[in-house]
Amino acid sequence: MAKNIMFMGTGSSVGKSLLTAALCRILNNQGYRVAPYKSQNMALNSYITKDGKEMGRAQVVQAECARMEPQVEMNPVLLKPNSDVGCQVILMGKAEYNMDAQDYHAHKPELVELVVSAYNTLAEGKDVIVIEGAGSPAEINLRDNDIVNMGLAELVDAPVLLIGDIDKGGVFASIYGTIMLLEPEEQKRIKGFIINKFRGDVALLMPGIQMIEEKINIPCLGVVPYKRFVIDDEDSVSERFDNKSEGLITIGVVYLPHLSNFTDCTAFEMHPEVKVEYYRNQRELQLANPDLLVIPGSKNTIDDTCHVMESKMGGEIRRLHECGIPIVGICGGYQLLGNEIRDPSGVESSKGTIEGLGLLDIITTIGEEKRTVRTSGKIQGNFMDMDLTDLMIEGYEIHMGESEASENTKSFAVLEDGTMDGVVSKDGSVMGTYLHGIFDNDDFREKIIETLRVKKNLEKGPAAFDFKAFKEEQYDLLAETVESSLDMKKIMEIIGE
């Protein structure tokens, strides 16, 4: 059976996901067969495996760092919030039910067998499992029935490293407070702590480290510097939405309240000549001057469409369209661009039928069965006056609605199973698709960028951007930074190697 190690944090967004990814790459570089694991993940950013299962995107990044194909056992429980107090519960990649927070907490003991079974399956044939916790183990109101922090560590007998985020301030208090709120047996599981996102001279930090080590009798295993890595984030608290980077080409993204799969635009964000802007309200759209506007996916298209209309963002989107700005809608964004969205079964809302933006001649009906599939196909539509006929693309679908197009529209693509995906408006200025990851396709993305260059009378750009190669460079940079900052000898001893 594989050995293991677990990262927990003093709170959310302290760097658990990235440090887990880094250790996966470090161990893989050393020849170990390593896999990531997170028993329960709450995120709207998900991914579809080759066998059509839905899992959290953070574990996909970690799997890529481990140089292995993502599999649903890495994230057996995925929670996708669909309101302030409730979420869709996805077990082993399949949406099972909707629950409010209180009911789900009571239901967690029934999931113990599932998370342990997934862990054991994943551990077969592996040397090390790198486990990520969630939030903080010091959430004492959630300790009963816990299956993702100390409760999980006990189930799989994992040693724990605690991460504190110094960039937020109060790192020593958060480390000390976390330890003190744990039971004595839980404290014994913590074999070391890591200070993450440090800016400045480490020498100035050392007196504080020595004092906190004496107080908690747990060693510091390293100080990781603050660095910006262009790597998919786990959730929408990411700094990406406030990014003020520069670029010759501007891609605008409408920020929806229930925005999901925001990593659909990551390939643009990584591109050296592109800047991505997120627009949260009518005023930001009024001031916007993007070269291309993207309406992203949504976990609740009905509510987000109502928000766009009631906030008057819809009028600004129509204005940009009238000004000649091309628009792409992905999944929920595709549905939002249509004439109507119908929800006869009340899957997302009790509103029944609502009007969309009317920029695509489609009517969407929300169904109760979720479609989750990885697929590929050939483009059929002529978008932005680009000749895209028979251009190969691939992506993945995650949606609970089907869109019916009028007879006088043209589909965007024909998929490998013969079904048609998406539509393109008559004038070729608006395109919708159910394919997430559409911009990850180098040929398609680079054709868009070059077409926008021509439209702006810019010189021909450099060689095409290799998205996968750039991701690998960022993974290696992350691993090098973390490895040089931590006491890897001590960490390997903790793992038992």
Image (cartoon, helix red, strand yellow):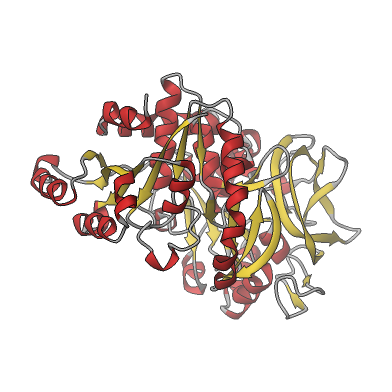
Q: Which residue of the protein is positioned furthest toward the front in this rendering?
A: 185
Q: Position of residue 244 (x, y in %)?
A: 38, 54
Above-or-below relation of 490 to 394: above
Left or right: 433, with 161 as reference point: right
Pick whichever, 462 or 375, lies toward us. Answer: 375
The answer to which image quadrant residue 229 occupies is top left
- Quarter of the image for the C terminus: give it: top left
Pick whichever, 398 or 443, lies toward us. Answer: 398
Pick whichever, 486 or 445, lies toward us. Answer: 486
Q: Is residue 241 visible?
A: yes
Q: Position of residue 133 (x, y in %)?
A: 44, 49
Q: Is residue 328 visible?
A: no
Above-or-below relation of 339 to 327: below
Residue at figure coordinates x 76%, y 62% from the top left: 360
Left or right: 62, with 424 as reference point: left
Count of marks, rendered view:
0
Left or right: 407, with 168 as reference point: right
Q: Position of residue 27 (x, y in %)?
A: 42, 26
Residue at figure coordinates x 27%, y 43% from the top left: 194
Q: Which residue of the protein is positioned furthest toward the right in this rendering?
A: 407
Residue at figure coordinates x 40%, y 35% from the top left: 22
Pick whichever, 389 or 337, lies toward us. Answer: 337
Q: Which residue of the protein is positioned furthest toward the top in this rendering?
A: 31
Q: Position of residue 126 (x, y in %)?
A: 53, 27
